[in-house]
Amino acid sequence: MHPSSVRSHPWVRSPCASTLFAIVVFTSAFVTPDGLHGQASGASNALATSERPRPSLVAMEAMEPIQLDGVLDEAVWRTGSPATGFVQAEPREGQPASERTEVWVAYDDENLYVAAYLHDSQPDALVVNDIRKDFDQESQDVFSVILDTFADRRNGYVFMTNPAGARGDVQMANEGREVNQNWDAIWSVETRRVADGWTVEMEIPFRALRFDLETVDRWGVNFSRRIRRNNEIAYWAPVPRAYDLMRLSLAGYLLGLPSAAAGRDLRVKPYVLAGTVRDTGGDGFDGQREFGVDVKYGLTRSLTLDITANPDFAQVEQDEQQVNLTQFSLFFPEKREFFLENSGLFFVGAGAQGRNRRFRQFLAGGQDLLVFFSRRIGLDSDGQAVPIKAGIRLTGKVAGLQVGGIAMRTDDVGGAPGNDFGVVRLRKNIRTSSDVGAIFLTRDAVGVSGDHNRVFGIDGNFRLPAEIEWNSYVVGSETPGVDDGQYAFRSSLNREGNFHHFTVGVLQIGEGFADDLGFLRRTGVRKWSLEWGLRPRLEGLRTKGIREMHPHIRWNYFEDLDGRKLAKNFHTGYSVFFNSGGFAELSIDSAFERIAEDFRIDSRIAPIPPGSYGWTNWRLMLSTDDSRTVSLFGSYTGGGLWSGTQKTFNGTLTIKPTYQFRASLGLQRTAARLDTPDADFTTSFWTMRANYSFDRNMFVDALVQYDAAQDLFNSNVRFKLIHHALSDLFIVWNEQRFFTGENIRPGRSFQVKVTQMVAF
């Protein structure tokens, strides 16, 4: 790893960086797990093991109809024994929850019912900030249930609500390594505020789930409650604070369900779209008339077939513009519903787990290579839509294997041929929380011989003693005309603990590796990565409003395959998490980049010439309590940038006067001075978001972006009405306008889309 080159870097001679690094070392040396709030480290380790006894709850048969109104007056709720005894993960892990919670589960021939009585000694202090579908659960009071319907202790469905009855549902795999926030099920919930808290009734149709009670006589289950004014999280089956509800290996059991299988699930969802579009600078409007259909069918108790014909994604929100100060393309996540459902099965690598999930999307090595990146299908390199003619997806379980398959065809555009895309994924669970898998990807140009790309590989995720996880994969590619270096591999060890965490990994990508269905930044590279940090909690600081400190380091080192240094980043940070939910961080970053070709960091200045560049910058980041009516996030970065200096500010002001309305104003601004002729520039992006919820089924969203450097204005306004279960009306307005004085006609589009789901 060429440690000598790391030691010789100018970062070591930076007084600020040296001071911050000394703080990290000092804290690690003198703060131990026993210095936490009276909890011995042995108790924490005992709590974290997946072999501890699991609590159980018996589901009761509803002998009379349950009226879904949030009022717990049915006999089944009055006579059954509830799940109680919730235990805190935050703020005082292992202590009883500050408020009593009771949960019941019942069933009839068609549905599973979950009822909860959430007692609260301060009912007027309940926090509700959102009633939109799939609301943000971090900033308000929330009740959640997770169902592990195959009792495999790793995959499940999450249903959640708040005191206003908002609906949220999530599909997760491998204990949260892969999370699909956009999964939608047909289910209902009603809530009521009562004198001493609030109550919940959920109705979840059996046909919305995949399970097999003929071979599995119990489900995994857990319940969680967030009391936002205390920034408190409590679970029925205790979970360490390093993890969350998706740690299914720690969940309890749901017993007493009838010996039955999931009912037939056939959904047909056609759509009709009409609109008009004028490209920016165009002379006139072109009419749009589209129709298509999506079909979902449960082939077996655990295997689902999805078919789409002429899919349309007009309702998908635009990507948010970002300042790019690197030599690589920016990563924009997938937002299209068809690709998001069951997407976790196709993920290869180590996704963010536990509390990592909130602050970064991937662990070390993530965005340097994503083996499968669905945005490659139906979007070109500029993010413009390429028509998809048809597609099919198969996901589920067969003979003890998790299986997934995707086949799609895109249409030809501008003389460029369409493509056939294919993905096959297999995964086999091993023991409690480990798995091995294989993946195959292919792209073939339609009607063009020799224009194709193949990728194939194997991967494994293993849970080792001491809560250590080992994730590895090896993939190869086959591209016509390329003979050597068509491979890539990655291996990492990760541990998420209450007191300390670490990740170490290596990634290598061969010179000839190509992945037309993946995301990668460069080839012919080897990357070494290390991340390590502590999370001490001191009772003396708690009384001053500080819940947790987080000194940490992150080191990434890139070299070519002959061992020559290509790039390096060494991040040293000290984070402080407040009792309120806000946080602050001070960090120092030392960077090095060697580039072989010039590139433009900004179109208005001369390109940065080939060579080696090293610089150091510092960052201060602050986020206030996001449950408040007014909240603020801001960061300031100063110091070096390539051959010069930078001053970068990124801030967002958010207001939430009611749970129906939310607005935010954000600014990304960089002022840079590089050591090349005519290389001073300032880049600013303004972003404004506004959301209004008329009720739980009708919303309007607006996203407005302004690029000051180009005098470019973009707006996206979307109205959504859920007029029936999983059936929507969308009205979408887009506009792109230049204010440069060149009289360029603005680009505009107006679209109306209606979907209607019919279930059989």
Image (tube, helix red, strand yellow):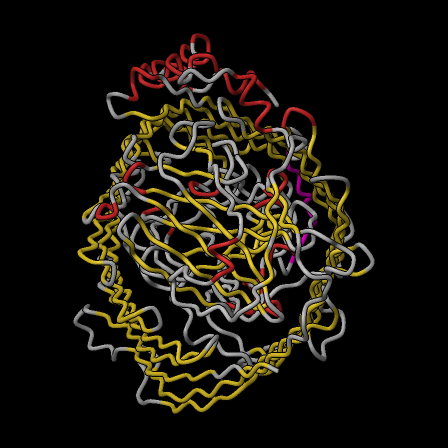
Is 575 located above or below residue 21 in the figure?
below
Which residue is more in the foreground, 358 or 52?
Answer: 52
Q: In the rendered view, does 174 fall on the left or right side of 186?
A: right
Which image quadrant for residue 702?
Answer: bottom left
Which residue is more in the foreground, 285 or 393?
Answer: 393
Which image quadrant for residue 192?
Answer: bottom left
Residue drawn at (17%, 56%) of the image:
657
Residue drawn at (27%, 46%) of the image:
627
Q: Decide whether residue 513 is among the magenta residues.
A: yes
Quarter of the N terminus within the rendering: top right
Residue drawn at (36%, 25%) of the image:
548
Q: Position of residue 73 (x, y in %)?
A: 41, 61
Q: In the rendered view, does 147 fall on the left or right side of 569?
A: right
Which residue is at the far top? Answer: 30
Which residue is more in the foreground, 501 or 131?
Answer: 131
Question: Magenta span covers which residues?
Answer: 506-515
Is most of the magenta stretch helix, strand or loop? Answer: loop
Q: Position of residue 624 (x, y in %)?
A: 25, 39
Is 202 located above or below residue 137 in the figure?
below
